[in-house]
Amino acid sequence: MQLKIMPKKKRLPAGRVALILFLCQMISALEVPLDPKLLEDLVQPPTITQQSPKDYIIDPRENIVIQCEAKGKPPPSFSWTRNGTHFDIDKDPLVTMKPGSGTLTINIMSEGKAETYEGVYQCTARNERGAAISNNIVVRPSRSPLWTKEKLEPITLRNGQSLVLPCRPPLGLPPPIIFWMDNSFQRLPQSERVSQGLNGDLYFSNVLPEDTREDYICYARFNHTQTIQQKQPISVKVISAKPNRERPPTFLTPEGNTSNKEELRGNVLSLECIAEGLPTPVIYWIKEDGMLPTNRTFYRNFKKTLQIIQVSEADSGNYQCIAKNALGAIHHTISVTVKAAPYWILAPQNLVLSPGEDGSLICRANGNPKPRISWLSNGVPIEIAPDDPSRKIDGDTIIFSNVQERSSAVYQCNASNEYGYLLANAFVNVLAEPPRILTSANTLYQVIANRPALLDCAFFGSPLPTIEWFKGAKGSALRDDIYVLHENGTLEIPVAQKDSTGTYTCVARNKLGMAKNEVHLEIKDPTRIIKQPEYAVVQRGSTVSFECKVKHDHTLTLTITWLKDNGELPSDGRFTVDKDHLEVADVRDSDGGAYTCVANTTLDMVSASAVLSVVAPTPTPAPIYDVPNPPFDLELTDQLDKSVQLSWTPGDDNNSPIIKFIIEYEDAMHEAGLWHHQTEVSGMQTTAQLKLSPYVNYSFRVMAVNSLGRSLPSEPSEQYLTKAAEPDTNPTAVEGLGSEPDNLVITWKPLNGFESNGPGLQYKVSWRQKDGDDEWASVVVANVSKYIVSGTPTFVPYLIKVQALNDVGFAPEPAVVMGHSGEDLPMVAPGNVRVNVVNSTLAEVHWDPVPLKSIRGHLQGYRIYYWKAQEGSLKRNRRHIEKKILTFQGSKTHGMLPGLEPFSHYALNVRVVNGKGEGPASPDRVFNTPEGVPSAPSSLKIINPTLDSLTLEWDPPSRPNGILTEYTLKYQPINSTHELGPLVDLKIPANKTRWTLKNLNFSTRYKFYFYAQTAAGSGSQITEEAVTTVDEGKLAGILPPDVGAGKAMASRQVDIATQGWFIGLMCAVALLILILLIVCFIRRNKGGKYPVKEKEDAHADPEIQPMKEDDGTFGEYSDAEDHKPLKKGSRTPSDRTVKKEDSDDSLVDYGEGVNGQFNEDGSFIGQYSGKKEKEPAEGNESSEAPSPVNAMNSFV
């Protein structure tokens, strides 16, 4: 049940048992809430909700609609009276009434006249609980009559005479609005000399020649019918002769020295005085024996009309208007009497009672003259209404006692005097209803922290229920707080905190039953501006940026809006808003002002402002700008225990406005010579209220800051010593850690002298076991930040607190932190260690965790030791074995061992690790890795070349990673155009390290691919290239005469690089190459192609392609000009060996390598370098002398 809401509220302190909050039952009227679900079921007498005005003026051109709406349960029926008798709407075909409504519609647009339906109407709404009646509605059609015809003679008068042009509009309903215009429908100008009176006449204090015109027309506008009536034009002619002599004022209206005016309370009192004279008089107003009311007095019509709005009886009295000009003054007294139609002092209110209760209806009204009060019951005068034993009438009050359901009725109170009447309906509804809670179930309330929270519990019941509130499950306590319970059932938490979050239950009870409802409360963090926009001084044309960083509750949506001078930002592209920044480009003078950042969420709003000052660009020569001069004349006033006021005088700002002042303090008692930041204030302030701490000997200094920097500090102020007090805070960073298995080391960050708040700073250190029943043990220490508790059990949790105290008293109760006594090495090794070999290089290890009690410390993780061991010698050689360690953090019970060697024998153990160290190792577990693919053979050499054979020697792979099963040798020839021939595949037994290839072509280059194999597959390959020897018969044809064919074999044993003929030949070749390079360069620039390219295109073999340098796949070179492919080659070291890691197949050296070049016909000339196969080509020039053998091969 919802009580009448009163300003009074009741405070209930919290208790140690379940706090039950009660609403005391009031023996007073109940108000039925306008709740749709409640009204559907609740029986209720009729109530008039809408009706037409008492004086109802209608438009005769439209249908007449007389409103009457009412509510009630069951829905009321409606009837009407007209001029005091029953109005039978069924007998008039033009009259209809809406279904479920009492509103009448009279269709006069089709036929009939509005005048036929003039009269006094009254509506009655009735159901089984009573009858309510409307006001008497006087229906009258509006009237806009024409002006009576009249002949208006022209008016002729002399310059300076007074004049009144009468309007005399026709009487209309309602009265028309009067205004004067000319034939062009332009309003005639008015002034102190010419003005319109309240009666519509046009007054001239004196006329001038320019007043001559023939179209002074008075118009009457009838707003109700939207029509305008026009008077015949009046002609005025002013003879422009010498003006009349000046004269003192006389009144044109009102006449005589005195007049009377009567007005009704609440209306507008209008008093008018219009005077004539030459020169034009001025009007003044005064009230005799009083002042004109302020805020309600207005002057109209050039002070010729005095208006007082909302007039009351206190405004009665004598008002005097004074007309004055240079020749004299005249006054007129208006006696004002304020009467009053009835008005309510206390209108009767609906009364809802339960059987057996008492109540009353009070009807008090006032007026002038005093109104008469009369009562009706269900629309019938109470003197002739059916008798009710529970009812007693006492003047303006009806008293009810011991009511029953038959006492339900609607009562009407009528207050009337000669100026009007008031009519009010008030029902008495006797109900017996169990409690109902009208607030929606599970309503969620969201409130900002540290603000009031209001939890609604709208209710209804008869008799009036009591209200109880619970927090959480029923029976839980609302402890250690103060709650406010409002009489409408609302629970108020004056300062909501985070712990106020939860579910609250409202319970309503009366003798007929009980109802309850749950609501939920969430407390949100307040929105805060953590970085405010700052005052800025910028030059015209520059760019300025304001920053506004906001912190808010992440569950709420944040909106940031920027304002300029409390209005919207200009719609100008120069203003850019990006998240928490506002940027103004090309600053203009008009951009100066206050910029405000407004941060809004659905629950709160904060704002911060900064002022932008725009200055002119620096003139030439530029004035000297500098940091401000230091402030001076520091003075301390209002010296209190915890605050003091500091004032100062600013120094010169040196042509840059001071943005802020920085105040610092020195504690001469504890930290002499050290200055600390106290606060900052705006550059507009020269005083600051400073908060102080106890027991500090303060000195202050001030620095000024402008856009160029900070001034030097001011001279220090006088010293001010504050009184001692108990500490405000306790030590921070309190920890409890053991350094030995049997101790607990308690440490903390001590308070500094500033925080001690007084002499004799000490610390009360307290501890007890967390899981025990021991009392707190305490010790008081001073000048230390550590205390060691000895004789503790190993690794036991302790509760610890450290409280500061001084000679004045103790700090607030400190927070309790948890620590542990010292750790010891773990006692137990992990059990059930299992190894799962994933592949040849990876194994997975599992183990069972060590019980926490056996760890005896903070679990850091588990550590795996593993090593490669020889079978059968695991224990014998352990001391010489290199072990590897992997640590797994936390409580993991498995881990992966990467990087194992294939085909190897491993052992491992697992240990648990805590803060003290490692525990014992688990029993060793051994495992074997499977075979893997081998590495490339360690080396490959080609020896003993002959005309048709080559011998290969190699070293086995350094990492066989298993048992070698065989070697694979693949080789193919390379012709003079660097194309690869057919590939030959040969298998060689694993026990061989030498192999001779026979039946090869003479003077032919071969490329070899060689790799080993195990059961797991093929390993990485190593490549090599070699050339069979040249045919001596052909060689003899090109050798000098002294070198015969019979000496060919011997010549191969001689270093021909030292022979003169060879040196000459090589010089000729070098010259030829140089010419070729120049020609190629010219042709390339002209878009030509190399002959070698054409040959390669002509002899392309789709099955034998050169291999890509990167991955061993087949690829091509690309011409720099047309991007068509060129063949790639490979390089071979000069010692005929290839390193094991250089196993990728590549033909890069057949291209533009360092030591390889093309002849004009595309043949290759040069020595094969000893570079690795993956090295990139570095140029077209060789740094080494060409090999004679290769030189011979180039001619083949």
Image (cartoon, grey):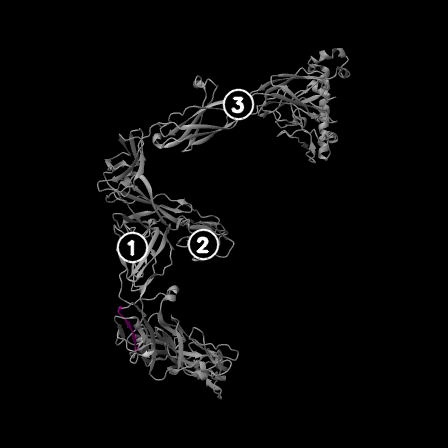
Return the residue at label 2. 562
Q: Give the amino acid at mark 1.
A: Tyr
SS for dot 2: strand
Return the mark for residue 919: none
Spatial separation of the CA atoms under disc 1 and disc 2: 39 Å
Q: Residue at x 36, y 67 (%)?
A: 42
Q: Give the amino acid at mark 3.
A: Phe
The percent coordinates of residue 651 (x first, y second) are 36, 48
SS for dot 1: strand
Tally of marks: 3
Q: In the rendered image, which quarter is residue 1099 located in?
A: top right
Which residues are drawn in magenta? Answer: 356-367
Residue 1158 in view: yes
SS for dot 3: loop
Q: Is residue 52 above or below residue 716?
A: below
Q: Is residue 905 above or below residue 1086?
A: above
Image quadrant where one finds the C terminus? top right
Spatial separation of the CA atoms under disc 1 and disc 3: 79 Å
Label whose residue precedes the other's in the sequence (1 or 3): 1
Few, some or many residues within 10 Å of mark 3 (<14, 14–19, 20+): some
Q: Give the amino acid at mark 2.
A: Trp
Return the residue at label 1. 483
In this rendering, the label closer to the viewer, 1 or 3: 3
Label whose residue precedes the other's in the sequence (1 or 2): 1
The percent coordinates of residue 40 (x first, y second) are 39, 66
Few, some or many residues within 10 Å of mark 2 (<14, 14–19, 20+): many
Do callouts 2 and 3 mark residues in contact (Cβ within 8 Å)? no
Return the residue at label 3. 903
Instruction: Please tell me which residue lies in front, 981 or 609.
Output: 981
Label whose residue precedes the other's in the sequence (2 or 3): 2
The percent coordinates of residue 578 (x first, y second) are 48, 50
